[in-house]
Image (cartoon, grey):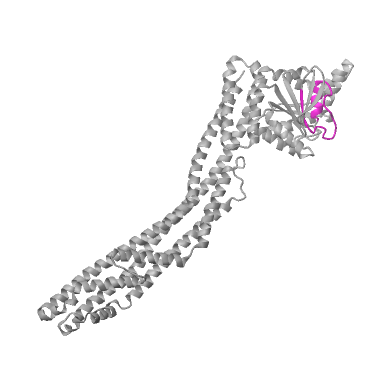
Amino acid sequence: MVQRVLSREHEELLADERRTLADLARALARFDATEEDQETLAAAVARLDELFLLVVAGEFNAGKSALINALIGRPVLEEGVTPTTAEIHVLRWGEDETRETRRGVVVVTAPDELLREVQVIDTPGTNAVLREHEAITRDFVPNADLVLFVTSADRPFTESERAFLQEIRDWGKKVVFVLNKVDTILREEDVARVESYVTDNAHALLGTTPAVFPVSARRAMEARQAADEAERERLRRESRFAALERYLVDTLDEGERVRLKLASPLGVGERLARRYLEVVDGRRDLLREDFTTLEDIERQLAVYREDLSREFRFRLADVEKVLTEVENRGLEFFDDTVRLARVFDLVNRERIKAEYERRVLADAPRQIDRRVQELIDWLVSSELRQWQAIHEHLARRKHAHADRIVGQAGGSFDFDRSRLLDRVGGVARQTVEEFDREREAARLADSVQSAVAGAALLEVGGVGLGATIAAIATSTAMDVTGLLFATTLVILGLAVIPARRRRAKLELHEKIGRMRRDLMATLTSRFDEEVAASISRLQEAISPYTRFVRAEREHLDAQRDELGRMAADLGDLRARIERLG
């Protein structure tokens, strides 16, 4: 239809519209839009090449069929006080009156001049008793180039009509109101009052002031059927039908029909663009909250790392204190032992070693084992608590919007997001449920002991960490004292022993101090590695969720930009169409 009457100067506009709507169709396909929405847009574009589509809608018993019969000038449609139109009726031009049902649509032909350029659609009532009849009407509205909305003068602008008109508004359709059955109103001022009521309510709902035509379809049909010219003229005046006919013939001339025909698919495109922009924004809002959750988890992990580091240093100081006490007792031991009065005792290595272990080491190995084990238990419990916190975070995130349907127009987003939350949350839950404190503590204890022994180049068996450190301390003490060379001390006598004691104490201080520093460094390094590994395990568990949220945000930002540009392009096209002469 458009190609047949559109002037050359407007061909560029039509080409731009087809291109923009094709881009929108591709975007909706990529967006996983519903099949119904994609088909609606495709049908709207296809109808650019068809006749102008005038859809007649309204409540049942408002007189829609009677109005169409009056327009055509013959009773081609059944009328009645019950919902007589249960199907879509399409009226087309034909040399003879025919009626044929095609795919659930009743096609009626009649030899009326209006139908040469306009197809008229009669729809079931907006308040039909059968819900599927009302659905038929709602589904057909996107195809309309112009909606002729019929409301009854005895019950104008009902709630069901308001709801239906709101959908028409969302599709961007031009609406002309027909106030039917005005012959039931006796006084002219009452007709004017009802007409004003319909105009005001339509303006409030649609945002524009529509054309409103008070008519009596029944009187108009009687006028067409009247044999007497005077009677026919009287009935036509009473019907007030001339103004509506003049509007359809004069106002809806070829240029106006083209303008409305071009604008019709734009309304469909604009509604779909708005709808999916809302879906994108809803998903972006949901992702924004997901980002907040991830940021909360990252903050938790940062605090977790800081708390572990601070608490570890504090607990490590307890271990260092034990070693410092060992050193102090060692210095006292040399003062008491390395002297002339005990020179013969120094010859007995086993005796000196036993005394050294009793007086210097004392219960240090047990203290070290206990405090290091407390440190290990604390670290293991801290990791378990962190797993529990992440599991609770993800569980709350999953259920926070369990009743919120975001993206039902294309469900892959919600499915992927929910699936990831299930999977990641399942990993956290399983880790919490299967976390074995004793096994983890034993593993960490063995690791720490091996690290300490390895740093000291000491072979250890199944002994505890305290015994390992005691072995290091004892070996160090024996190395620095040289007590096995007691014969030398006896020979050198008084001059050598004080100097040897001072040297032994200094070397003991330096070497045990070095051992203590090396031990603290080894323990710190090992625990730092454990903390890093713990955080890495936690981050790895949520990494699929993190990657999805970040990738989906980039994807949705791109989609929003694309849909926003298309909505703007559609708006520009509408402005160009409105300027058509």
- Compared across the picture, whether 363 is left or right of 107 comes to left
- Which image quadrant for residue 63? top right
Answer whether residue 201 is visible to the viewer in this image: no
Q: Residue at x 45, y 66 (%)?
A: 439
- Compared across the picture, whether 399 is left or right of 376 comes to right
Percent position (x, y) of residue 546? 48, 48
Q: Is residue 505 above or below residue 543?
A: below
Percent position (x, y) of residue 81? 85, 34
Name the quarter where the N terminus is drawn.
top right
Percent position (x, y) of residue 293? 50, 51
Answer whether residue 184 is visible to the viewer in this image: yes
Which of the two residues, 284 or 481, is positioned nearer the viewer here? 481
Percent position (x, y) of residue 216? 82, 26
Q: Is residue 23 above or below residue 554?
A: above
Name the quarter where the C terminus is drawn.
top right
In this picture, which residue range is highlighted in magenta? Answer: 63-91
Which of the two residues, 199 or 93, is positioned nearer the viewer here? 93
Q: Is residue 298 magenta?
A: no
Q: Residue at x 24, y 80 (%)?
A: 350
- Compared across the picture, whether 536 is left or right of 37 comes to left
Which of the two residues, 580 or 35, is positioned nearer the viewer here? 35
- Which image quadrant for residue 375? bottom left
Which of the two residues, 482 or 337, is positioned nearer the viewer here? 482
Q: Is residue 305 above or below residue 341?
A: above
